[in-house]
Amino acid sequence: MDEGLLQYGSGVTERLFWRQAQALIEMHTGPVITARQVGEGFNSEIAVVINDTTFVKGLRSDHPRVWTQERERRINPHVAKVSASLRWTETTGGWDLNGFDLIEGRTAFYGPSSPDLELIVAMMTRWPSAPDGVDLKYAEQRWSGYSDRSELFAGDWLSHTDWSPGNVLIGGDGRAYMLDWAWPTRGARWLDPACWVVWLIASGHHPARAQAWASEIPAFAAAPAHALTAFAQAQAAMWEDIGDHAPQPGLAAAAARWVEHRTD
Ligand SMILES: Nc1ncnc2c1ncn2[C@@H]1O[C@H](COP(=O)(O)OP(=O)(O)OP(=O)(O)O)[C@@H](O)[C@H]1O
Ligand SMILES: [Mg+2]
């Protein structure tokens, strides 16, 4: 019997689920010849490269976070300059699947001597502006639970906000790409470089060096000092709250070091 190439589960019901997903994918890609699972599988039930040409990300339609799929669809046409284009969507058969162009590359590395950092700065300088008519989160609301000055984070700029290196791909073409647009947010122009700072510190940068990298983005260099400090404090509170559910250890400590550096 054809077992299907998507092999995520071992039970009969599981196998049936994946075969159904495979049939839905094949409506768009033609026969699945190769299926390579990618990502750490934190969020997506399906994250798979099909036939070395398409990246498919999906959740079952009854998944509590299935709305992240719709959010990615809505923002995708507006972030083409820095991300992978969405080619198709399938929301039948109990699944919600998004099929993107495959970007050949590797996950970014944020360590102090990484050549990727320049490429990421270059990506941030070709960043798209916030689109009209797309429902975005608002920075001042997203962090209101972690700051009583969150109005300082407001603005009209499009922010990604999830700077996990797993969401940044270094393409074979020497460019950095930003993936996983599940939380597009309207906020201050310095917000994304500020989110990046925490990850840089967690990756071994001294807070001063991390800020120097972020300052390559003029909007961060020009950001009001008190707003940045309030944001660093909000990040520290947020990562502390997320605790063991954080995608990697050390983020709360990194954000706390950043706060300390700015308030010493
Ligand atoms: N268009 C693409 N081309 C190539 N690889 C991709 C593409 N989109 C995503 N990936 C890879 O797949 C991984 C998972 O994708 P993404 O981050 O969008 O999903 P996720 O739900 O956050 O998954 P995870 O929980 O594993 O992080 C990424 O870390 C990246 O390595
Ligand atoms: Mg991700």
Image (cartoon, rainbow, N blue to C red):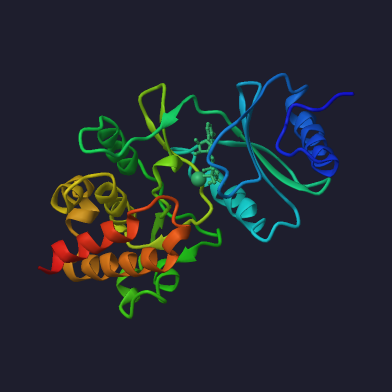
Q: Residue furthest bottom?
A: 148
State the image quarter where residue 150 is shown: bottom left
- Image coordinates of residue 63 in percent, x first then y, are 70, 57
* Count of numbered badges drawn on the protein: 0
Can the viewer see residue 257 in this picture? yes
Position above or below: 259 against 167: below
Q: Which residue does the image show at 27% across and 69% down from the upper left? A: 233
Position above or below: 98 against 230: above
Instruction: Give the camera-side residue of 235 and 188.
Output: 235
Q: Which residue does the image show at 86% across and 24% down from the upper left? A: 2
Position above or below: 240 against 100: below
Q: Which residue does the image show at 66% across and 21% down from the upper left? A: 51
Q: Residue furthest top?
A: 33
- Image coordinates of residue 8 in percent, x first then y, are 70, 37
Can the viewer see residue 185 in this picture? no
- Image coordinates of residue 30 in percent, x first then y, are 77, 23
Q: Quadrant of the C terminus?
A: bottom left
Q: Quadrant of the N terminus?
A: top right
- Image coordinates of residue 113 in percent, x first then y, are 20, 33
State the image quarter where residue 172 is shown: top left
